[in-house]
Image (tube, grey):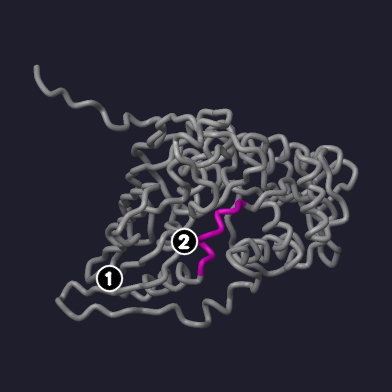
Amino acid sequence: MEQTGKRLRAVVVGAGWAGEGLTLALRDTGVEVVAICARNAEVVGKVAQRLSVPEGSTDWREAIARLRPEIVAIGTPGSVRREVVEAAVAVGAHILCDKPLALTGEDAADVYRMVRTAGVRHAYASTHQYNPSVAWVRELLGQGIIGVLQQVQVSLAKRFFPPIGPWVWFYDLASGGGMLNNGATHVFGILERLVGGEITGATGWADRTERMLPVVPGTRVSWGGEGLEFTPEAAAQYPQRMANADMQHIMLLRLSTATGDVHGTLQLMTVASSEPNRWRLMGTTGELIGYGVLGFNRIMHVPHDGGEATEHPVPDRFVAALPGIESDLGRYTALLRDFVADIRNEPHASYPTFRDGWRYQVAIDAIRNSRGIPPVPHDL
């Protein structure tokens, strides 16, 4: 379905952080955003006005059917994404979907089959793999700086949300919440781009500790733990809703590479820690250590021969290659640049698709459905 030379129009479904980011990134790649949709009329009206989008709608089905855009961008909670994909496919639109693609691997497979059968282009927003530092580490690995890659170890601890904060969809597994759906999907994309291969096996443990949290009207997801934080006494003044999404996990992965299978371990804890977040890529002659959560603010090479450790700052050419849009939204633009070029039948680099979203969800299912941490008896 080629769109060579045609002005592309998009409908964005979702008016939260992702919806706003998708709107700005679509414009940055020359696409006209003709409508943005969300459930709350007041919210979507304000967002449409602030972003100068011609239409703010509370009926995404009607907007897609009437406007028949060339692109539908989905930034909703995961629970409604399949329905939006169905509506987009019905009008022949190409589709970009935020993560997760679906709530289960089986549902994700159905969505992937749907777009493949329809013959539309599809992109999956595992966008942190576009961080310039990831491209630089991949190049260093390709140069053989650590010999042959043998193992990967990722240890992340970051307080994404306050211990007692307002309930948001992120805490609800049925809405596509949790760290596996929204954090591990980025890590998977980064790992695959680093090693130039794919995840071929996964197991592990996911913590789904249930707790009640206060429901505060108008609260949106706020990354980094900032925003409202309550004492138990203050939280008790609000209606309560159950939080049941997995907020931390440990996993063992198998990744294919050009030189053979590599195993990786990943630990992600949503707590504050004095230890640095660290990615270790261990090879036959040394290791690369990247410090950071979903990208590396410092990259060190440590040789095995006892030589001195050296730092490898990200060259300016990698930073310049990231399309310029304010803050982290540049990664949406990087993805959309290739996706839109593909729709226009122009040269483009490979980009994550619904196939990746499906594979990642299968891996997440395997981790969630594993035996986890079996009890150990203390006596016979």
Count residues near mark 1 (Cα–Cα under 10 Å), then give few for <14, some for 14-19, many for 20+. Answer: some
The answer to whether the residue labelled 2 contacts the one labelled 1, judged by CB atoms less than 8 Å apart, is no
Residue 241 part of the magenta-drawn span? no
Determine the residue positioned at 37% across, 76% down.
Answer: 143
378 to 302, vertically: above or below: above
Count residues near mark 2 (Cα–Cα under 10 Å), then give few for <14, some for 14-19, many for 20+. Answer: some
* In the image: residue 177, left or right of residue 338: left
Q: Disc 1 marks which residue?
A: 147
> Farthest top residue?
380
Q: How many marks?
A: 2
- State the CA–CA distance, disc 2 to disc 1: 18 Å
Q: Which mark is residue 193?
A: 2
* Disc on the earlier residue, 2 or 1: 1
Q: Is residue 277 visible?
A: yes
Give residue 204's position: percent from left, percent from top.
34, 39
* In the image: residue 262, left or right of residue 345: left
Q: Which mark is residue 335?
A: none
Give residue 156's position: percent from left, percent from top.
36, 54
Give residue 334's position: percent from left, percent from top.
62, 66
Give the magenta part as a residue range.
124-131
The foreground one among 83 and 171 is 171
Give residue 253's position: percent from left, percent from top.
35, 47
Determine the residue positioned at 86% across, 63% down.
Answer: 6
Identified by mark 2, the residue type is Arg
Identified by mark 1, the residue type is Gly
Q: Secondary structure at mark 1?
A: loop
Determine the residue positioned at 82% across, 37% down.
Answer: 61
Q: Is residue 363 visible?
A: no
313 to 111, vertically: above or below: below
Q: Secondary structure at mark 2?
A: helix
